[in-house]
Amino acid sequence: WQDATTMATEVKRYEAHETVLGSSVAKAVRDARVLVVGAGGIGCELLKNLVMAGFEHIEVIDMDTIDLSNLNRQFLFRQQHIGQSKCETARDSALKFNPRANIVAHHGNVKLPTFGPSYFQQFNLVLNALDNLSARNHVNRLCLAADVPLVESGTAGFLGQVQVFHKDKTECFECQPMPSGKKSYASCTINNTPSLPIHCIVWAKWKFADYFGGEDVNSDTVGDDDLLRAEENSLNDRLEKGFASWLFYKLFHRDIFSQRRASELAGKEKETWKGRSPPEPLDSEVILAESVADETAPLDAYGKPQLPDLVVWSLRKNCEVFLEMATKLKERNVPLSFDKDDRDVMLFVTAAANLRCHQFAIPIQSVFDAKALAGSIIPAIATTNAIISGLIVLEAIKILSGHFQECRSTYLARKPSGSRVLLPNRLRAKNPNCFVCSGSNLTVTLNTSMTLQVFVDEFLRKHLGLVEPTITVGTSIVYESGEDLEDDEIEHYATQAGKALRDLHLGGESVVRIEDNAQVLEIDLTIVHSDQLEGAEDDAGEKTEKLFQVSGDTPMPAIATNSRGVEPPPIGVAASASATVIADDNDLQVLQEPPQDTAVAEDNPRKRRASSEAERVEIEQAEEVVVLID
C-alpha cells in the first residue's frame, strides 16, 4: 500500500509542470543537465526552485562553509550545519523538496583545473550565484569555451539583476567595462577566511555592535566534542579576570579554535586552508608576558617621531589597546553605535581588526588607515535573493524550451518605474571591442623596466583575470605556468620572472601572444613603453602610482537608450561616473556612500517613463567585492 501511495505521489509530482509548460518542455527540464556555481544566498533559493520546477540533473560547486551569519537568509541551512560544506548541505536539504532529483555537490574552487572547459561541456545550462567578480569572469570564459548558455545574477540590498549570455548570440559578461570603484564583500569571507584589512575592519565593527550595541549575542552550541568543551570551560574561567580578558579570549582564542576544530571534524581542514596557513589562537596573558612594552615611537622619513595615529602598533600594543578600550566601553553601560569620531570606539575597532589581521597573516593598519577604511554596510535582503532566483529559473526554462529570443536581462529596482519594479531589457549583441569574446587586440602602456613577475601578477592575473598565463613572442615561449611543468621548466621561468620586460624584448610596441589554457583564451597584446604614467588622484588630491594603462579594453559602442535617455547597466557596471553601488548575492556590502534608488524602463513600445525625471539610474556592481556576492 505504501509503495502504491509513493508511486501515485511521484506520478502527480509533475502534473502541474506539464499543464503549465507542456509535456515536451517539462521533459526538457527534467532531462537537462544544469550546473549551479555558488550555494550562498541566491544559490540556496535557486537550488530549491530548480528541484521544485522539475530539474533532476544538477551539479553545484561552492568552496565555502556555513557560518552563523548565513542562517538569516540561506534557508537550506540550520544551526547544526555551522562549519559544514555549503554545497553538500544545500544538496541534502534541497533533496527533501524533490527526492527524485540527482544533485552532485563539489566542495571546491570553480577555478580548479578539475572544472575546465571539458567539464562545462556536459551541461545544457550554467547558472551563476557567485560572490566575486574574478570567479564570474572565469565562469564566463569557460562558458564561452564550452559554448554553453550562462545565466548570471547578483543582488545588492533591494537591487538585483538577472542576465543571459550565450556565445555569438549575445554579449558576454565581460563585454561591458567594470568600474574600479567601491567594493562589497561576502560575510562568509569576513567571518571565516579574511584576506584583506577591510575584511578584518568590518569584522571588528560587527563585534563592536555585538558586545557594546545593546543587543543579545547568540551563543554558539558546543556539541559533543571533548576538545570544544574544554575550550568552552577555559573561556568561562576568564570571566573571573574581567570582561576584557574574557572577550579577548572569546574572539581570538576560543572562536579561532572552534573554527579550526569544526573544519577538522568535517574533514575539510586541508580544503579550507589550501594555499594559506590556518590562523593560530591568541592569548592576551601570553602576549603580555612574553613581549616587551613599546617605549619609543617610530620615526618618520625626516627622523621625527611619527604622529600617534600613523604608527602601526605591535602585537603587544594592539593587545593592550584592546583590553583597555573594551573595559572603557563596557563601563559606559549604555548601548553604543559605531562612530568613527568616537576615539574609544575607533581604537577598539582598530585593535580588534589588527589582532585578527595578525592571525590571518594580513598587514595590520594604523588608526589613521583603519579609520579611512571603515565604511557603511548594507545587509543582504532575503526577499531580493528569492525574487532573483525565481527569475533565473524562468530564463532557464526559456532557453531549454527553444525560445532563447524571448530571454531578457531583468533588473529589480528599489522603487517602481511606472507600476513595475521588475524591469526587463532585450539582450545586447556582443561588443566588437571585447578581448574575451570578440578577440580584439589589447594595447598596454607601461614602463618596461617592470619585471616579468610584476607584469604577470598585476596585469595578467589581477587585471585580466588569467589563471595559467603563457607568454609567447614569435615562436619563443617567454613565460609559462601550470601544474604540468617539469622541475627544470619551473626553475627556468622563475629566473625569467625576475628579469625586466625590456631585457626579454617585451616593449617597443612588440606584439605578444597571451594564452590561458585553463580558460581556453588567447589574446594578442601590444606592449608600449612609457617612462611615466599619470595616475588618478586619491581623496587627498595626491597622484597615485599607476603601473600600466590599457586601451582596447572593452570600451562600449553606442547603445540604444530607454525613455529617459539612459541604458540601464547590469549590477556591477557603473551607470555614471558617480555610480558606486557594488552588487551580488551579498552577505553585505561595504560602501563609501549609501546607494541610490534606481528606476529604469524597458526598451520596447510598452516602456514607461519614470515618475520623476530627477530620479537617477544608478544600478551598479563591483568587483571582488563586487559582483558580489555571498
Image (spheres, rainbow, N blue to C red):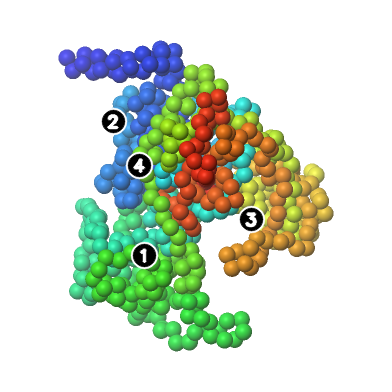
Bin the neighbour count of mark 3 within 10 Å (Cα to Cα): few under 14, some 14-19, many 20 and up: some
Separation of marks 4 and 2 at Cα, in angstroms? 21 Å
Bin the neighbour count of mark 4 within 10 Å (Cα to Cα): few under 14, some 14-19, many 20 and up: many
Which residue is depicted at the point 33% across and 23% down?
100
Kind of residue indicated by mark 3: Glu
Mark 3 or mark 2, earlier in chain? 2
Separation of marks 3 and 4 at Cα, in angstroms? 36 Å
On residue 458, the disc is 3
Residue topped by disc 2: 96
Between residue 156 and residue 399, name the one nearer to us: 156
Mark 4 or mark 2, earlier in chain? 2
Residue topped by disc 1: 338
The reply to whether dot 1 and dot 3 touch (C-beta < 8 Å) is no
Residue topped by disc 4: 382
Which residue is depicted at the point 29% across and 63% down?
213
The reply to whether dot 4 and dot 1 touch (C-beta < 8 Å) is no
The quadrant where residue 503 appears: bottom right
Give SS at disc 1: loop
Separation of marks 3 and 2 at Cα, in angstroms? 46 Å
Between residue 416 and residue 167, name the one nearer to us: 416
Kind of residue indicated by mark 4: Ala
Which residue is depicted at the point 33% across and 43% down?
73
